[in-house]
Amino acid sequence: MWPCNCSNPTLTNDRKSDMPMIRVEMLTGRTEAQRIELVEALTRETARIAKCPAADIQVIVSEVERTHWAVGGVLNKVSSESNVV
């Protein structure tokens, strides 16, 4: 990842192209407080490592239903006893 304030010859002069974007995909079930804490931590640490303002960092959190997530070629199923497979 290029730091926000460096000159990367492949980027245009458009400042938006220097903004780090983080995409997080996770199973549904986290609380809003957990999502907020995750976004704050990712933003803080990315700003520190990439040496750019936290205000320039974008985080997109996508939640996926457990029944739409496969591991090892096996699609998860919601058990009648619990929501975790």
Image: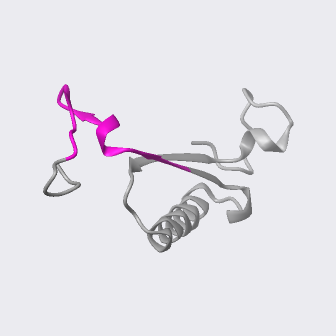
Q: Could you tell me residue 39's position as x and y percent?
A: 54, 63
Q: Is residue 69 left or right of residue 62?
A: left
Query: Residue sitting at 16 percent across and 51 percent down?
Result: 80
Question: Quadrant of the image for the N terminus?
Answer: top right
Query: Residue sitting at 75 percent across and 31 percent down?
Result: 11
Q: Could you tell me residue 31's position as x and y percent?
A: 43, 68
The colouring scheme, among rainbow, by chain, secondary structure or one colour, is: one colour
Query: Residue sitting at 17 percent across and 30 percent down?
Result: 72
Q: Is residue 52 left or right of residue 34?
A: right
| Residue furthest front in the image | 80
Per the rendered image, the range of residues in magenta is 61-78
| Residue furthest right in the image | 13
Q: Could you tell me residue 36's position as x and y percent?
A: 53, 69
Query: Residue sitting at 58 percent across and 62 percent down?
Result: 43
Quick check: 44 above or below 77? below
Find residue 75 and report its image quarter.
top left
Count of numbered circles in the view: 0
Instruction: Residue 12: say if magenta.
Output: no
Find residue 9 and report its image quarter.
top right
Q: Is residue 25 left or right of residue 11?
A: left
Instruction: Residue 72: say if magenta.
Output: yes
Q: Nearer the viewer, residue 11 or 44?
A: 44
Find residue 57 and report its image quarter.
bottom right
| Residue furthest left in the image | 81
Q: Could you tell me residue 23's position as x and y percent?
A: 53, 45
